[in-house]
Amino acid sequence: MAGNPTQSSRNSSLRAANPQTAEKHRRESLFQITLPFVLAVVLLGGLALSLGRVTAFNVSQGARIALIGLILPAMLLGALLLGLTTALLVGVTKAIDILPSYASLVQQVSAMLAQRTRKVADASVAPLLRLQEWAAIWQRLRRGGLHKKKPNWE
């Protein structure tokens, strides 16, 4: 593998990591990802502990609060999707009322363009077809005429 020129050119294009940029990336990932995550966990844990000490907090009450925390985002997402579906349904219904006349116009224009395209294509090929026809007639005449008897294969 070491003698393969394409392999050596690939290896030369891969450079070693720059220690300065690697250190900068490590520092940025610490401050942008790890630190905010740890702070959020500590904050939520502290909030849960403080709620437990301040109020008469029992397990069933905590379960109810957790259930609300789980249901509320799903309910909001469901309401958003319901609104989006309703808006799409109303939009499609209105489009169905408007589109048939425009669709008819588009269909007529499309048929007209297809007819014109076919006409131009036929006109552009016609001289070549005539030339081939005359060439075939000329070859047939040189070989012995137009009304040569067909061989009897029986």
Image (cartoon, rainbow, N blue to C red):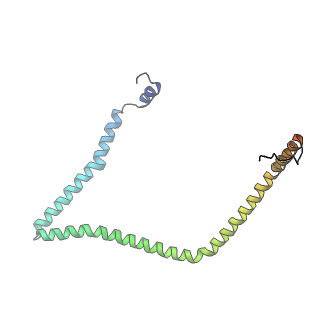
Expressed as whole percent of the image width and height from the top left, the position of residue 23 reads 31, 37
Please indicate whether residue 12 sits to the left or right of residue 151 in the image. Answer: left
Please indicate whether residue 57 sits to the left or right of residue 119 in the image. Answer: left
Which residue extends farthest front? 154
Expressed as whole percent of the image width and height from the top left, the position of residue 92 reads 51, 73
In the foreground, 36 or 119? 119
| Residue at the (52%, 76%) spot, across then down | 93
In the foreground, 121 or 60? 121
| Residue at the (13%, 70%) spot, across then down | 60
Q: How many marks?
A: 0
Please indicate whether residue 49 sits to the left or right of residue 67 in the image. Answer: left
| Residue at the (21%, 69%) spot, across then down | 67
Please indicate whether residue 66 sits to the left or right of residue 82 in the image. Answer: left
Q: Is residue 42 above or below residue 144?
A: below
Q: Quadrant of residue 115?
A: bottom right
Q: Quadrant of residue 57?
A: bottom left
Q: Quadrant of residue 123?
A: bottom right
In the foreground, 18 or 141? 141
Expressed as whole percent of the image width and height from the top left, the position of residue 135 reads 85, 44
Expressed as whole percent of the image width and height from the top left, the position of residue 5 reads 47, 24
Q: Where the N terminus falls, by quadrant?
A: top left
Q: Is residue 142 above or below residue 76?
A: above
| Residue at the (88%, 43%) spot, across then down | 138
